[in-house]
Image (cartoon, rainbow, N blue to C red):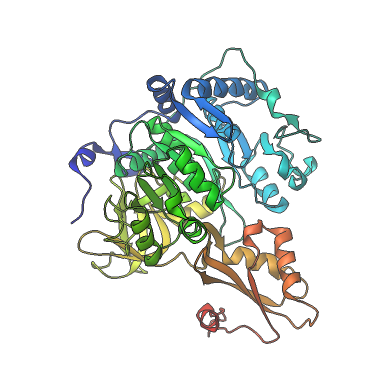
Amino acid sequence: MQNWPAKITDLLSYETHFGRSDIKCFSDRPSDLNVMVKQSVARNRQGEALVCDEVRLTYGALDAQVDAVALGLMAHGVRTGSRVAILLGNCPEFLIVLLASLRLGAIAVPINVREQTPELTHILNDCGATVLVHDVDVADRLPPQPDLPQLEHRFCVGGPVAASKDYDSLLTPSGELNAPTVSEEDTAVILYTSGTTGQPKGAMLTHLNIIHSAMHFEMCMELGQGERSLLAVPASHVTGLVATLFTMLRTAGCSVIMRSFKADAFLDLAAREKVTQTLMVPAMYNLFLLRCAVEDYDLSSWRIGGYGGAPMAQSTIQELSEKLPGLLLVNAYGATELTSPATILPLGMGTKRSDSIGITVPCGEIRIVDPNGNDVETGEHGELWIKGPMVVPGYWNNPEKTKSEFQDGFWKSGDVGSRDAQGFISLHDRRKDMIIRGGYNIYSAEVENALTAHPSVIECAAIGRPDPVLGEKLHMFVHSTDATLDDAAVKAFVQAHLADYKTPDFVTLTDTPLPRNANGKIVKAILRNQL
């Protein structure tokens, strides 16, 4: 049985949190995220905390800027429990506003900059954000003020925008910061994840959740002070937020921020900044192998290549091991509700166990159950139920979903997998109807619900179509008797209502009904076979 080293497991104790008993936790941990950050500032004040383009901030400078923005937020009414929405791409201001919100005991709500107006309206109203900090590039998609009755202040990064104040007006260089008392069970971040009903639901990531996930990455990837992690995935996604930003804050390391991923720019930046660790989707590794001469870059510092969100092809693993022999590939499986990882592949197993998503993280517990909730035998398939201090307590303002997706302290993932005699877990099917396109989760029902609103669409079904670079692309089957409806119209309609990555890549139009079973449900297996 593969286990984590005793130096990790000896640090565990059983505790009760969120009304869930017998949760394995790290006994020696920061009491909250503010304490965790202050600890890193104290031990690495002169070391780099953040690099983005020409901006370089030491831990001391970052700490000062966080205080300045926290004072500005406080002057605009932000208090313990207030929600501060962050609609920013990868940039220094994202991290600064995030930490400033936490410093006030407020709740940060990062939002993907690719969301469209209807989604933004729902998220901002659902979380009750009173402050929004946004990029100038998304100004044209912001909901009008009357549609956001709880939103009191808007601040823009990158230039002047009507109805928004300049970000610099938040910077308050002096004043007394009222440091609140924060419990580790308090919500620190709300991340909205698309649901099968079509309405995003807000997973409540607590201080306890994020600290344990950062410590899991730290210990299982054997990270220490001086690490430099390249943020190439969105900071607003749980992977970028936790696996890079908070993990570097835990280890007093440096987050090297890419505003947007480009294969050649990624390798150039990784070499120039002597990056040691990454966590990305396999599509990103595929892209730089396909488009770049890896041997032209000095990547000798790059030690850990984490990946998740989709399986990595064996050919990709083989090519990476040949071209970057010093890079340890580490598969990690997680979800927003898990604050990122639930399993991690132990170091050195990247090529030996490429079939597996790894073993359960030290503080985690995974049951593999049959449809009745009974544990299956070793090697048999079942649904993964996951427990631990990294599992969120539930969804913001959504007790019904919380009740249906959590049971006896476990989150019911909906993913089908198995565990072998050595403890390695393999996934066999993804969460029902979910498509993972370049690391972005797309729920079929969300796209289907949006497209069904088109007057010419009778019914439709979204299918994941295998793609060697992105993992999957989105293929829509559309039943319509309108001869004037074409692919372009279908794509344009979806794009107007949902984030751009949810726009179909392919469309099949048919004037006959889609296949259904005896219960009247569309049989997507038949549609997949047609592809």
Residue 160 location in percent, x, y?
A: 78, 33
Q: Quadrant of residue 369?
A: bottom left
Q: Is residue 418 above or below residue 220?
A: below
Residue in the image at 74% along x and 59% along y: 496
Q: Position of residue 328 (x, y in %)?
A: 32, 50
When the figure is inspected, residue 129 is found, relative to residue 292, above or below; the finding is above
Q: Residue at x 69, y 29 (%)?
A: 167
223 relative position to 254: left or right: left
Q: At 58% from the left edge and 84% from the top edge, which residue is drawn? A: 515
- One can see residue 409 in this view: no
Nearer-the-camera pick, 135 or 231:
231
Q: Residue at x 57, y 79 (%)?
A: 522
Q: Nearer the viewer, residue 428 or 387?
A: 428
* Residue 92: image location, x then y, percent: 58, 33
Q: Name the image quarter holding residue 154.
A: top right
Question: Quick one: 118 or 402, which is closer to the camera?
Answer: 118
Residue 172's x, y, as percent? Answer: 64, 18
- Residue found at the far top of this picture: 175
